Amino acid sequence: MEEQDKILHEVTSKEYEFGFVSDFDMETLPKGLNEDVIRAISAKKEEPEFMLNFRLEAFRKWQKMPMPDWAYLKIPKIDFQDIIYYAAPKKKPQYESLDEVDPELLETFNKLGIPLEEQKILSGVAVDAVIDSVSVKTTFKETLAEKGIIFCSFSDAVKEHPDLVQKYLGMAVPVTDNFFAALNSAVFSDGSFCYIPKGVKCPMELSTYFRINAAGTGQFERTLIVADDDSKVSYLEGCTAPMRDENQLHAAIVEIIAMDRADVKYSTVQNWYPGDKNGKGGVYNFVTKRGICRGESSKISWTQVETGSAITWKYPSCILMGDNSVGEFNSVAVTNNFQQADTGTKMIHIGKNTKSTIVSKGISAGRSDNAYRGLVKVMPGATNARNFSQCDSLLLGSTCGAHTFPYIEVANKSSIIEHEATTSKIGEDQIFYCNQRGISTEDAIGMIVNGYAKEVLNKLPMEFAVEAQKLLQISLEGSVG
Amino acid sequence: MTQTLINKKAVSEKYSELYQVNRSTLDQGSSPVLNRMRDIAIKRFEQQGVPGFKNEDYKYTNLERVFGKEYRHIFEYEKVDVDLNEVFRCDVPQLDTYTILLVNGWYYARNKQLEGLPDGVVVGSLKQVANEQPELLENYLNRQAALSDDPLVALNTAFAQDGFFMYVPENVKFEKPVQVINLTRAQEAVFSTQRNLIIAGANSEAKVIFCDHTLTSSECLGNSVTEVFVGDRAVVDVYAVQNQNNKSNAINSVFFKLGEKSNLMSGVASLHGGLIRNNLLVSMDGENAEANVYGMSFTDKRQHVDNYTNIQHNQANCLSNQLYKNVLDEDSVGAFTGRIHVARDAQKTNAFQRNNNVLLTDTAKMNTKPQLIIDADDVKCSHGATVGQIDLDALFYMRQRGIGEADARMMLMNAFAHEVVQEIRIEPLRDRIDELVEKRLKGELGKCNNCDA
């Protein structure tokens, strides 16, 4: 038992391993937010008028909105005038091969364990790497272009495909959706845009890596994925952030539009800097992610592994408009030390015969708080809707908390909604059983935690599953397992 | 939006004003034990006002409409022109109880003398006991309710004058239940404030049944608060049978404080009513305590039943079970919010909660919000919630065996409800509720059967 406590202590006192700062020349706007800053961002990015209007509308709405306080989080007061809203690497490289890329940038990627070249060859993943807001390098663009797939940075999309952007921007997340979405809509710097034409199955996993870099810069990404009729795409997003003492604000938006019979899978591994073991520093992660299944029989699937951030406020959601559409949410959220997470999903059933599945696994350690918050709403017209939700929490240590706040609203008689949640710790009998069979307590805890999260990890694409397992170990296991 | 805010403010101010105008009448004849808490309470009410949909705890029950209507308030006991002992007959066969009547929130003046109560047990009017034996209740009254931040509990505290009081001394155990019949009888819309207090000393045993009835078909709004103190090793059962007319609005807040090794059984059956909101808060303040909390409702027409439970595990080694079931027909709306809160260091807690709902029509709605807040690691906690229909496989199985569809459905619905009913620890009451449920499901209990209309 003492041994077990010791290991748990080691596991939970582990510090963040990926902290480092890269030195780039940054071009930044002064701190603060007002209409001039927004106009300046828009001008710097050479945006058409509709974009400026979109930003200004969002900003005006945002000014009237209060900061949400309903989450089970203690959020220190954020001074939105003390943040730099735009930072871009000065040189915008346009390289065809990796040799031409800034060596320091390559070094950063190497530290992150994403050798671009290797990935290009081995896994066939096209990487649109985003460092502090501006897209630096897009690979495989040509291969994708042959199929008619558009995969580029958001700024390029605004320039090259303004009609598509104008049509779909804000469709899933309107500017007034919530406080942080409005903020993002007003100041978003860059992000990714992806359009899969009718009938096209994307031949490779699409991915972006986000990093927060310049000190004191909030990062406001915006991703828009549109999957037209009968198309299919799998999109990966992953991030690690350098160690900083100052809190950093991150308010991203991801929008997914799925048309008839389209199938979109969005996977995230989130590992922003969580603060040190005394709760100092760390990223505030306020993300709005939402997909609309507009077409019949369309499918949107969210998978996330959340191990980082001091505060996570994130609810990837599906609006199931089309008949027979399907929504999925699979999540592993790990909190340690003083981390706080309030995360979950919303499944809004509007179309007939719509189905949704929610699997949420929370692991809390140290003095952290980990909450699941989810809404399953079945509208009167959503006949024969079906939902199954399962939320499990695992507690490691007596000073952490695990909380569950599901909301279920059903308004017709033919739908079946089930929700179940359990909270427990690793059983002494489980450890004893493993010990009996010659497995050390360390290995046993590792096995149990991994086994516990397996159901979700299995949903990740191969490339990510490995990284995710590694992250789980770093966040929790330390020397264990 | 702005309109609602204005209304909310106006509605809340109406009650503040009512309080100021009637302050002296409220104090008159009431014990200082009751009067001393009024001013603080009304301030607490004013801070939040009548809860609207923005209040997370009242998300699914909008009370602004209900509180916005005009009611007649009764600040002094009114004589009843008929003998209620004759007018009202409890129709539960073989149920032998000590019966107490309350009318519009006031202890009925012509209640019969209770015979055979064990020595030391005090059953009576809160107003009277507070005046004559304040030492019995001054350490208890408002000690649990004041912890709540519910504005309606504060509103009750500000206006409380009378209600039901029971005191069971240490080591006194009695089997025969005390039955409290709350009657609403008025020709016009009436607002009643009722305050109940039950104190069960260490090692005692007692059972209380609250029956809510309306004798008239007019509209009414009741805001009641009940505090129940369960002493160490005491065993207390509290049942509520709610059977009121379709225009009634009832807000019932019940607070339980559990001592060490105590055992609580709480059962609520909402058979009929217009709008019913039951708040149930259990504070487990002693180790090894056990709380069993059950509820069920049957709604049709435009009825609204909202059950809110909050089980606070403040001490280690406690057990709580919650089971709530709702059957919703026609245009009715149901809501359930259940919270289990395990405090830090309340290790070895076992807490279970389940909420099952059946929707019978496409116009009925069910909203459920089960919650777990767990701050200790060595615990076993779970909750489950379902919204659905009768199991079609089970129905098919029964029909295969020659049972007609209507009968099969009835049997399955009965079985659905029986899971709650079977937990009732008073046999005649259990049988009676089973019977009422069956009647209710067959539509024979079309209206509350005691009403004059």
Image (cartoon, rainbow, N blue to C red):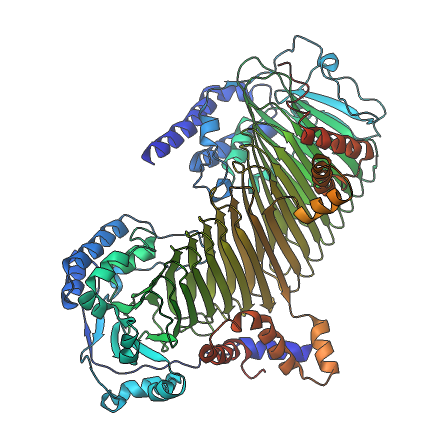
The reply to whether residue A169 is in sight is no
**Place of residue B132 in the rendered image (x, y in percent of width and height, measured from the top left):** 69, 24
> Quick check: B218 left or right of A17?
right
**Place of residue A454 in the rendered image (x, y in percent of width and height, measured from the top left):** 57, 73
> Quick check: A159 left or right of B445?
left
Q: Quadrant of the C terminus of chain A?
A: bottom right
**Place of residue A338 in the rendered image (x, y in percent of width and height, measured from the top left):** 48, 68
Does B451 appear above or below A97? above
Does B409 appear above or below A349? above
Residue nearer the viewer, B31 or A434:
A434
Q: Residue furthest top?
A: B81
Residue nearer the viewer, B90 or B435:
B435
**Residue at image coords 28%, 69%:** A191
Residue nearer the viewer, B129 or B358:
B358
**Place of residue B319 in the rendered image (x, y in percent of width and height, measured from the top left):** 71, 53
**Residue at image coords 53%, 67%:** A367
The reply to whether residue A430 is in sight is yes
- Residue B227, image quadrant: top right
- How many marks overall? 0
